[in-house]
Amino acid sequence: MPKPNLYIETERLLIRPFTPADIDAAYAMNLDTEVSRYTGDGGVVSREEMERRIHEDVFGDYEKHGFGRLAVELKSEQKFIGFTGLKYLADLKEVDLGYRFMSPYWGKGYATESAKASLHLGFETLDLDRIIAMVLPENKASIRVLEKLNFVYEKDIVEEGMLARLYALSRSGYLSGFRRK
């Protein structure tokens, strides 16, 4: 299978593969305690750790699976504001939707807009049958995003030592709900 095009443009966003130039902005985002409060990973402890995660994990996913987490730029500012995208979780044998944004960009619909683009990539390009998303129970805004996208709560799980809610969206749920225009 040829590698999918990981450059996606929405009305307000440019969604693209991470580059080394994104390391400092991604690190700054993860230093924000408001952002890391909902990640379950406690944030990134050093710039070197962020660099390692992008080089090994993100670039590794692109190489191994042909997809992964993608940087999100606000087109009007030509600036990194967060990430979105799909990640294969080997321990669960599932593809996970994730998104994270700098806190000044919360509440503006960017998570929903970027997640729709990620779902389009997953179901329309990668031909996936199912995509999951995990969220901490106290992250009400993220739960609302998933519900807007037709995700259905399945169960509580313990992930990385924390209680998380697992939501899932099937291809049929995607097709009957919405399709990115």
Image (cartoon, grey):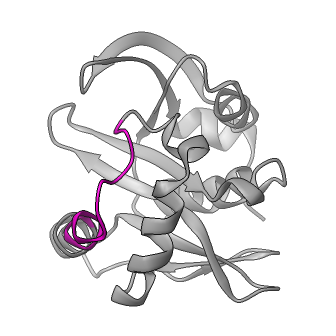
- Which quarter of the figure is the C terminus placed in? bottom right
List x then y, in percent, for residue 86.
41, 55
Residue occupying the point 82% across, 47% down: 107
Decide which of 9, 32 is in the foreground and name it. Answer: 32
Residue occupying the point 52% across, 40% down: 171
Decide which of 95, 101 is in the foreground and name it. Answer: 101
- Which quarter of the figure is the N terminus placed in? bottom left
Q: Is residue 159 magenta?
A: no
Q: How many marks?
A: 0
Q: Quadrant of residue 6?
A: bottom left
Q: Quadrant of residue 166?
A: top left
List x then y, in percent, for residue 105.
75, 59
Residue 166 lies, with reference to residue 53, above or below; the image says above
Residue 169 lies, with reference to residue 119, above or below; the image says above
Residue 65 lies, with reference to residue 159, above or below; the image says below
Q: Quadrant of residue 40?
A: top left
Q: Can residue 12 be seen in the rendering of this structure?
A: yes
List x then y, in percent, for residue 66.
27, 71
Residue occupying the point 72% across, 50% down: 112
Q: Name the side, left or right, on which 124 lies relative to 20.
A: right
Residue 151 lies, with reference to residue 65, above or below; the image says above
Q: Name the side, left or right, on which 48 lies relative to 180.
A: left
Residues in magenta?
41-53
Q: Is residue 46 magenta?
A: yes
Residue occupying the point 49% across, 43% down: 36
